[in-house]
Amino acid sequence: MEVLAPPLAKGRRVLLLDEMRTLRLFSAIVAALPGLARAQSTPAYEVYAVRFATQPSYPTRYLVAGADSARRSKLAFTVWLIRGGGRTMLMDAGFYRPKFLDSWKPVAFTRPSDALAALGIKPEDVTDIIISHVHWDHLDGADLFPKARIWIQRAEYEHHTNDSGAVLDRAIDPDDAKMLAGLKRAGRVTLIPGDSTEIMPGITVFTGGKHTYASEFAAVHASLADGRTGTIVLASDNAYLYENLEHHRPITQSLDTLSNLRAQERMARLASEPRLIVPGHDMDVFVRFPRPGNGIARIE
Ligand SMILES: [Zn+2]
């Protein structure tokens, strides 16, 4: 036994070493798996700004805190299309109810659902709509898309309305509150639990912009020009114009100016490049991203 023991032990030791090598290799593979799985399952989305109306002249001081009262800005009304991974998603739904057209008199108005036709998208193709905040020009069009699931922050929903569509804060239009509550009762609304929530692979939403009670912006893993990928930030009205972002000026309509500035700083950290932060109402988006054109800008 004593004679046989050493070779066995030696053999066993070799086996152990092999096992350890195998284990180490296995551990390394397992450690790499989340990254591999992510790379395989996270789509690089195509992102577009789709303009469906404009406002020719709007006081800039209502957009950029402290702006000269003589200045006017042209406003774009926009929905953002996020396409990939078998989904056709929107951030925000625009507006279409006649009372908004009557009171705001936008020019070059097309229903948001029709504006998507230029990209070959029918209203029933839209699978999801991420509502950045409850203002009429972002929420009102949600019922134009018969199959879409609506994503909104729970705090934003509960602060402004309830399942009977009451108006709990005047930031929400009464008809939009009823419409949103109706979609909720129909089981088509998902309430997002808070800040920094990845609601789809590669799409994470963030609060803190404080345009409304729990307004949100989104960071999207996107396909860019020349086959690159990167992170696009859709700011919506948490940054109205490039001027807010580039001159570090809070939006005028904010419940918390410092929180708004911090949110803009966060956008800058999240976006792969500063140029990939897309403000909510700036006409220049369609100049900086001129393709394919005619009110549609591929953010790339
Ligand atoms: Zn807006």
Image: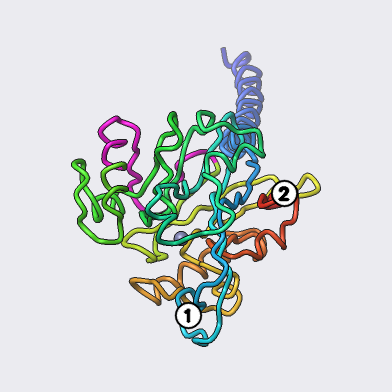
- Residue 235, percent across and down? 52, 60
- Residue 273, position as x, y percentages in the image: 67, 62
- Circle 1: is it few (<14), some (14-19), or many (20+) Cα within 10 Å? some
From the viewer's perspective, tell me whether residue 6 is left or right of residue 124.
Answer: right
- Vertical comparison of 163 with 29: above or below: below
Report whether residue 181 is seen.
Answer: yes
Query: Could you say which quadrant of the image residue 167 lies in?
Result: bottom left
The amino acid type of the residue labelled 1 equals Arg
Q: Nearer the viewer, residue 218 or 68?
A: 68
Q: Earlier in the sequence, mark 1 or mark 2?
A: 1
Percent x, y for residue 79? 54, 49
Residue 24 visible in image: no
For the record, the magenta segment spans 180-201
| Residue 116 spot, x, y in % from top left | 60, 40
Describe residue 77's horizontal placement relative to residue 40 as left or right: left
x 78%, y 44%: residue: 227
Residue behind mark 1: 61
- Element marked by disc 1: helix
The residue shown at (40%, 47%) is: 97
Which of the numbered marks, if any, corresponds to residue 224?
2
Res. 135 image quadrant:
bottom left
Q: Residue at x 52, y 44 (%)?
A: 111
Q: Residue at x 56, y 35 (%)?
A: 88
